[in-house]
Amino acid sequence: MRTRDLAYVAVFAAIMVVLGLFPPIAVGPIPITAQSMGVMLAGSIIGARRGALAMLVVALMAAIGLPVLSGGRGGIGVVLGPTGGYIAGWIVGAFVVGLITERVWTRYNIGWAILANVVGGILVVYAFGIAWYAILSGQSVVLAAAQNAVFLPGDAIKVLIASAVAVAVRRAYPVIEAAPQRA
Amino acid sequence: MLLAAGIGLFMIGDAGVLAALLGVVVLGFAAARVPWRLAVRQVGIALPFLLLIVLVQGLVEGWGSALVVGLRILTLLALAGLVTLTTRAEALIDVVERALTPLKPLGVRPERIGMVVLMTIRFVPVLREHADAVRDAQRARGVERSFVFLTPLLVKTLRTADGLAQALDARGVDPGRAARQR
């Protein structure tokens, strides 16, 4: 990775921190946050590896106790706690969003953007979040998934915003290089 | 230290003990001569969120447990605020780098990650400045509150990142080596 890549990673990690400043809406034990939009934006704009790295940096900062998670939370207790799966999901989620985005980069449009963000930003993040939460809270996966359903409307809106922004940014300032040749 | 404190706090279930710990942290603020208003602001940002959690917890699981949860989060927030205010960013980065050193054989380069964390911390206020600038520019053109807001903000910030990277490269700062010279 070159210096520029590291700077991009820092930008999106910082965006996650800023999105965390928006007060989360607490519905049950898992807060609804603006941060899931950061996951989508990172994957869509700087791609798989850098996007995942940005999420990793955020997770790391949270783990050493910096208040980078929504509502000023932080600390290893949160990262490894019952909702920690969502944080692990961010890393993989951003990677998946980026992976899809890179594959379709030359014909990227709002439709592809939405597809990538739904798969990576919702499905992957939920899968990690639900599985982890079910294991740590001892609830059945079905119950955990049902609790998770409250996120859907909000996340659908976030997907639309993130996708529109990703398409616009690609036009104005493309960062991802055209689909990887090794593919 | 904050890691350990975080885990420890989640194990304490007694409201009295938590209140006492909160007192200790408050004394810590006093000892570090943190300006009163700054200290309050550290915790104040999260206050609506905290109240909401306590309210939900109180309604769902009873007020006793709500008090414990509230005190626990408040103490952790105050402690995190205290550490962040009294510790220079470099010291925090050093902790990160030291914690990651065992991963070196796996190809992880702790200095680079420390550098990225430092850049991230620096970019937070930059994003704020850019957000203000974009909002001013839009208002000047008669655009109020627009969803298009995020796009110019991101483009502007990515440009800044490019500039920063070029400046670092031009000065021969290899993120992999820079950290060690400190």
Image (spheres, coloured by chain):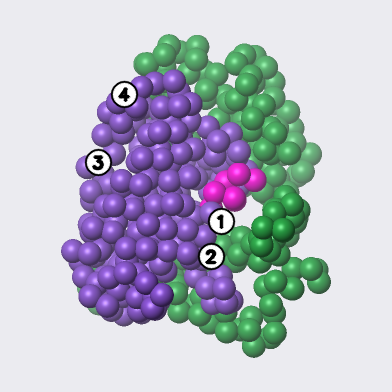
Chain colours: A purple, B green
Marked residue nearer the N-terminal end (4 or 2): 2
Question: Which residue in the structure is indicated by mark 2?
Answer: A10
Discs 4 and 2 share one subunit: yes
User: Looking at the image, is B150 positioned above or below residue B68?
Assistant: below
CA distance separating discs 3 and 4: 15 Å
Query: Which marked residue is nearer to the observer: mark 3 or mark 4?
Result: 4
Where residue B133 appears, x then y in whole percent?
Answer: 40, 72
User: Looking at the image, is A156 positioned above or below residue B56?
Assistant: below
Identify which residue is drawn at 42% across, 63% down. Answer: A48
Q: Amino acid at mark 4?
A: Leu
CA distance separating discs 4 and 1: 31 Å
Q: Is residue B35 magenta?
A: no
Q: For residue A57, which numbered disc appears in the image?
A: 1
Marked residue nearer the N-terminal end (4 or 1): 1
Question: Which residue in the structure is indicated by mark 3?
Answer: A152
Q: Residue furthest left?
A: A111
| Element type where label 3 sits in the image | helix
| Element type where label 2 sits in the image | helix
The residue stretch that appears in magenta: A57-64
Marked residue nearer the N-terminal end (3 or 4): 4
